[in-house]
Amino acid sequence: LNLSAVPVVGLGLGSVAGLGAARLAASHYSVMTKSAAMFVAGPPVVKRLGQDLTKAELGGWEIQTKSGAVDHAVDTEEEAFAAARRFLSYLPSSVHELPPDAPCDDDPQRAEDKLFSIIPRDRRRVYQMRQIIEAVVDRGSFFEMGKMFGRSLITGFARLGGRAVALMASDPYFYGGSWTADTCQKVVRFLDLAETFRLPVVYLVDCPGFMIGLDAEKAATIRHGVRAMAAMNQTTVPWCSVIIRNAFGVAGAAHTPAGRLALRYAWLSARWGSLPLEGGIEAAYRAEIDAAPDPAAKLAEIEARLNQLRSPFRTAESFWVEEIIDPRATRRLLCDFAQLAAPLRQAPTPGRFAMRP
């Protein structure tokens, strides 16, 4: 009940088990010290299963942050309390209020020249998404949560012109930005948090789709994926998505829910569709390629033909995105979005929405 009414922070400052562990996990944000441990049952009980483990081996900070049971780990108790205070600074005291604004001395018109060349021309190369985040939000305002879990997606709070937003961003360093089962779970929890406390969502997109392969199937990625998409469509807060590079497949298309203020911009480096040409051609034209006297030549011919048609401007002309933008204009447009979204935020009716921890 508290999770749908007031911000809840859990701090693990020692060893917690059973109900204590549940209380730490039943929070909007949890942080533990690196000397602490959390588990359902401690080493003496687990030893009966034939597992002789220390507290750290069973439920130390590395275990719990990588599993997503705890959002963050710090060295000292002072750092834990500081992290809790910073988390709370973005949120209202209850759902009866709106997120507080903060003074801003960072020019909304600031344009970072490095953004124009930050995306490699070679699409097989990766780049630092966190550098893009820091360049477009108010300086020093990004507060990341759940960094070690669902690592193909970055989540956290930030400010744009002093206004708090919930920010998601793909991280191409992990699975190329694909949504894994863990990533989908991370999306559900984060969007529930944004919806509960009326934070507009900003999403920087570079997602080639759901993760594929045997491990992904064993993890029920598609089941977790549709839950993430359902959570997205259940939100009512304003959205703004910026397609940085890739937006392919079902997961790539899941970036702008309908029925509210929802803006979509695309960088010049953006491309999107059902499947990328690499791999997609073989699937879509398999019969034609197999029947050709020279399959390799036929594949090259089809690829050359489709490459001539591949242009983000074609899609923009049909209004799939509002505008193709100079990357250096991203901060200005996001600050404009935050300003447009501000009067649309309304404190929800208590009990209307339930946060899923």
Image (cartoon, grey):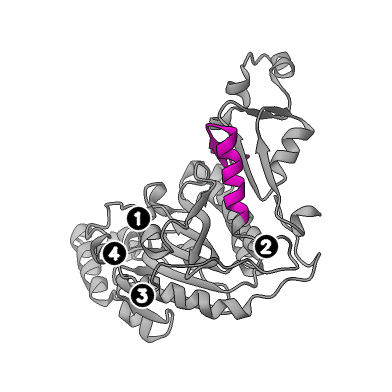
Residue tagged 4 = 115
Residue 109: mark = 3
Q: Amino acid at mark 2?
A: Pro
Instruction: Measuring from the top left, give residue 299's x and y in whole percent.
Output: 24, 62
Tell which circle, 3 or 1, labels the residue nearer the N-terminal end: 3
* Residue 51 in the image: above or below residue 354: above
Q: CA distance from mark 3 to mark 2?
A: 27 Å
What span is in magenta?
A: 65-88
Is 264 covered by the magenta stretch? no
For label 4, the crowd category at 10 Å Cα-Cα, with few meaning under 14, some 14 to 19 and many 20 or more, is some
Which residue is drawn at the image coordinates 20% and 63% (left, top)?
A: 300
| Separation of marks 3 and 1 at Cα, in angstroms | 18 Å
Q: Earlier in the sequence, mark 4 or mark 1?
A: 4
| 57 in relation to 187, above or below | above
Residue at 29% x, 66% y: name it. Answer: 112
In the image, what residue type sits under mark 1? Answer: Gln
**Cα distance between the residues tagged 2 and 4:** 33 Å
Does the image show residue 355?
A: yes
Q: Is residue 254 visible?
A: no
Numbered disc 4: secondary structure: helix
Q: N-terminal of the two: label 2 or label 4?
A: 2
Q: Residues within 10 Å of mark 2 (few under 14, many from 20)?
A: some
Q: Position of residue 329 (x, y in %)?
A: 34, 74
